[in-house]
Image (cartoon, rainbow, N blue to C red):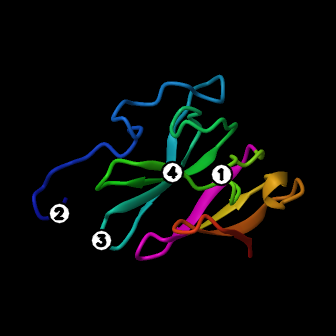
Amino acid sequence: DVDTGAFEIISRKSDGSLPTSAYWSQGASFYGPMASADGRYVVYHSDYTDLHGVANSGTQVSRKDTTTGAVELVSATSGGNASDGTDNYVLDLSADGRWVLFVSNGANLGAAGNSQIFLKDMQTGVVDLV
């Protein structure tokens, strides 16, 4: 927080605990963090499989609400199923945190094995191939 100087660990799960289950045998990390203009939402991609209670594999994109602590899976179908691709990476976040642009090779998103760019509306859950 630039006003108070306080720090927050963004990589916590919704229940406040730290993730522990890595998809890759060499461990897991967090990459590509981006924040909304007001700092409320932070998106990133990570190799952890226990961030949001949704079965997933590989690197997935998540959005953290720093006000509520909720962590949502971005790289998921409109129905909430995690991308079945192992390569999902955040590209951009709108200023208000509503729209997330990401790349995925998930066939269940429509990528058919090739990496494609998707736009997800975090309010409605709709995912569009760009």
Q: Which of the two residues, 89 or 77, is positioned nearer the viewer here?
A: 77
Residue kind at label 2, given as amino acid type: Val
Residue kind at label 4, given as amino acid type: Glu
**Residue 11 position in % (x across, y down):** 40, 41
**Residue 64 position in % (x across, y down):** 42, 52
Secondary element type, mark 3? loop
The residue tagged 2 is: 2
Which stretch is magenta? Answer: 86-99
Which comes before the other along the chain, label 3 or label 2?
2
Left or right: where 81 falls relative to 54: right
Which comes before the other along the chain, label 4 or label 3?
3
Which comes before the other along the chain, label 4 or label 2?
2
The residue tagged 4 is: 72
Secondary element type, mark 2? loop
**Residue 35 position in % (x across, y down):** 39, 64
- Which residue, as the protein is rendered here, is positioned at the far right? 112
Cα separation between marks 1 and 4? 10 Å
- For the residues labelled 3 and 2, say whether their Cβ atoms are less than 8 Å apart: no
- For the residues labelled 2 and 1, say whether their Cβ atoms are less than 8 Å apart: no
The residue tagged 1 is: 80
Secondary element type, mark 1? loop
Left or right: where 75 falls relative to 52: right
Cα separation between marks 3 and 2? 11 Å
Residue kind at label 3, given as amino acid type: Asp
Quadrant where the C terminus sits is bottom right
Q: Quadrant of residue 110?
A: bottom right
